[in-house]
Image (cartoon, rainbow, N blue to C red):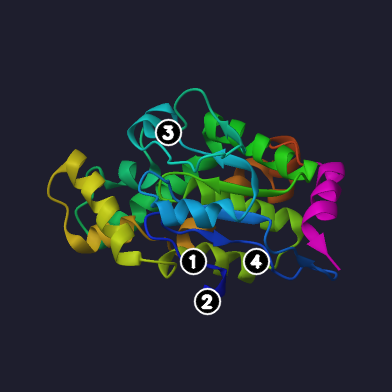
Amino acid sequence: MNNQRVVALEGVHNFRDYGGYPIAGGGRMRSGLLYRSGQHVGASDADLAVIATLDLRHVIDFRGESERQNYPCRRADGFCAEIIAYEGETANLAPHIEAAGGVLTREGAHRAMERIYRNLPNRQPVLWVMRRYFATLARGEGASLVHCLAGKDRTGMAVALLHHALGVHPDDAMEDFLLTNVAGNIEARIAAGGETIRAKYGAVDDETIRILMGVDARYLHAMRKAVEEAHGSLDAFLADVLEVDEARREALRLHLVES
């Protein structure tokens, strides 16, 4: 795992650059243009100063209205990036919180997360944001940040699909997905997630919290399998559902890939 991707912050978890990966046929994704993270309610002044140096032009927020109200993002003075978000709920609950309901065992937690990932490609509000994510990146107007509540599930699906669209090897895409498990202050992120989960569901053991706040290769495999069963391939899903046809892919490559 390449921890050089991680932007070390005090109160924003899972903040990292998801560019830089080699592309099939030659070239490499540009670094310093594509960032992902969790929510920013706990951002310190020092965090805001670091984020300001990234010169973000767009923030794609996969959270729904209630999540944004409960966890409002802190912004630096002068912050002027375009915020793209859905005016409504993108999920009844954040996926990792939704998965916690009724979970009693380690394997139960994994099965719940796999179920969530199988359903993510069917959530129309999530797909609404996803289409705007790809359209925004294709304009090539500068650096962007994509995030949700924990920065791992809705965000993880979006990033994995962009990596596929650009020709990133599946092993590299999986490496980026799994980087959630080692990026930044993991214990603080797990503790913050555990507080939210227990506030809703009561006593949930530490091991289950750790699973719900992490990711596993089987989750991304579950998403991909669900897409392939419903649409035939990831490419068909990108073109037919997310409006990422060959022309848009070429625009994405133009702006996000260097030779």
- Which element type, helix, strand or loop, lies under badge 1? helix
- Which element type, helix, strand or loop, lies under badge 4? helix
- The earlier-in-sequence mark between 1 and 4 is 4
- The earlier-in-sequence mark between 3 and 2 is 2
Quadrant for residue 94, please give it. Answer: top left
Instruction: Give coordinates of residue 29: x percent, y percent.
Output: 74, 64
Please state the extent of the stretch shown in magenta in the rendering: 245-259
Furthest toward the top, the residue is 87
Instruction: Give coordinates of residue 53: x percent, y percent.
Output: 60, 56
- Which residue lies under the disc numbered 2? 1
Q: Are marks 3 and 2 in contact (CB under 8 Å)?
A: no
- Which residue lies under the disc numbered 1? 178
- The earlier-in-sequence mark between 4 and 3 is 3
Q: Residue at x 43, y 57 (%)?
A: 46
Q: Is residue 26 left or right of residue 191?
A: right
Q: Amino acid at mark 1?
A: Leu
**Mark on residue 91?**
3
Q: Is residue 191 above or below residue 94?
A: below
Q: Are marks 2 and 1 in contact (CB under 8 Å)?
A: yes
